[in-house]
Amino acid sequence: MATISRYNPIVSPMKDHNAFIEGVMEYIQNEVDADTRVESPISGGVDSSVVTKLVHRAIGDLTYGTHIDTGFMRIMKRREESEIVSGCFPDIKNFGVVDARDFFYKNVMGVQDAEDKRKAFIQCYITTLNNEMKKHGCKIISQGTIKPDIIETDGHVKSQHNVNINFEGIEKQIEPLAGLYKHEVRAVAKALGLKEEAYLRQPFPGPGLSVRTVGVITPEKLMVEKQVNDIVEQTLNKYMMKEYGVAMYFDPTTGEQIPFQGFAATFDNRQKEAPDKAIDHVNRLLSDAGFADAGSVLKLNIKATGVTNGKRRYAPILCIALRDEVPYDVLVRIGKEVPLANRCSRALIQIESVDNPFEKDYLVSIRIVRSTDAITAVPMDVPLDALNHAGEWIIGETNKVGAVYYDITPKPPATIEYE
């Protein structure tokens, strides 16, 4: 297996951007021999974009920036993300886009288990990059691995596509951001001069929408997920512009980004009545707070990933329809206590539904959280009218979705992503 070299920052980028960048430049130049080509995969997210910028600044045209179109990338304001990424690196001479959609679809679609799906994606990623590195003659690969990726992989919460991977013919993997959390990476991105839409964009998982299209993926279900994820991002941007005057707020002092992450997940419509214990638990918490019993508590017979004591749990989801408009603090208490006590991964509250939701093929969950490090997170207190707008838009746009929910579960007991 190739040597893995992880940069241990001498100074935090939150304290001194220039000193951190200079330290990374020296690290990269020490790790890369003269005339050695470096493959730098670019997903389009902030981590891989920052790493590629740093490597290119350190070694110039020996950098080979590769964006793999897996087919599981986002649509952003009706534009494919691969198209957007292609315009972000005009200064990198050896930049290219690889169309690997058919290969990824063949191997990832049809897989049920979340961890198996991630591993299938990882294998496709490795194979594709191996081919590109062989073509380019690269002996070193740079990865956009950050500290939470390492923690979650080593803790067996979920496998990351950029942690402890064995590539063919590679002598070394360098990870310049391995000591940083997401907010610190954003500080570096800003110091490097990346555009605001690049360094303040929503975090996006390496396996892309394959882990937001929950359960077995079909072409139709994936297309629905692309549509609804775009709708949620657009709705969230509109809300943030109204409330904060920016599409995403970033506090360079504390490192907090608001929101930390906002997206949609798509599930097959497989609901059944929840166990009496779970129904009684929800109703007791509502009653204690002075509100009416829930209209219904259903169990979604599809599992999603949760986390308890730092370990992965793979468990069903509770879907709750409320009779009253319940305050945020009560919702968060339900989202924290009910899943843990009832062997579920998370709890969702219904925000929009068609008259006969069981006649439609899919359900959608909106997940918007606040966090600084991705290790812990809380659901964001988004006004009901903004959520309702997103729900109505999703149902009207797709004609395939029976109900839209809002995820009220903190991390822990839920992970931020669903798989």
Image (cartoon, grey):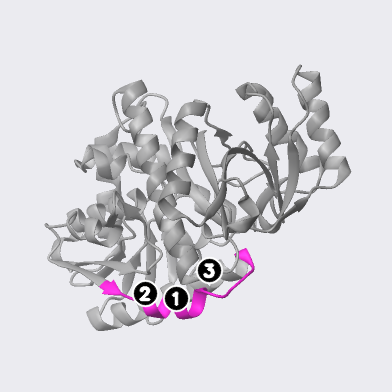
The secondary element bearing badge 3 is classed as: loop
Q: At 36% across and 51% down in the image, what residue appears?
A: 47
Q: Which mark is residue 69?
A: none
How many labels, in total?
A: 3
Mark 3 neighbour class, 10 Å CA radius: few under 14, some 14 to 19, many 20 or more: many
Amino acid type at circle 3 is: Ile
The residue positioned 18% from the left and 72% from the top of the image is 35
Task: State left or right for residue 327 relative to residue 184.
Answer: right
Dot 2 lies on which element? helix
Q: Does the magenta run of residues contain 111?
A: yes
Rendered position, 33 above or below 191: below
Which residue is pictured at 42% across the width and 72% down the height? 125
Q: Is residue 187 visible?
A: yes
Q: Is residue 205 visible?
A: no
- Given residues 4 and 273, the one toward you in this image is 273
Q: Residues within 10 Å of mark 2 (few under 14, many from 20)?
A: some
Residue placed under numbered mark 1 in the picture? 105
Q: Quadrant of residue 59?
A: bottom left
Residue to which mark 2 is pinned: 101
> Residue under circle 3?
217
Q: Are marks 1 and 2 in contact (CB under 8 Å)?
A: yes
Q: Amino acid at mark 2?
A: Arg
Q: Which region is colored magenta?
A: 98-114
* Magenta segment includes 135: no
- The Cα atoms of the two marked residues, 2 and 3, are separated by 14 Å
134 or 240: which is nearer to us?
Answer: 240
Percent x, y of residue 189 = 28, 42
Q: Quadrant of residue 252?
A: top left
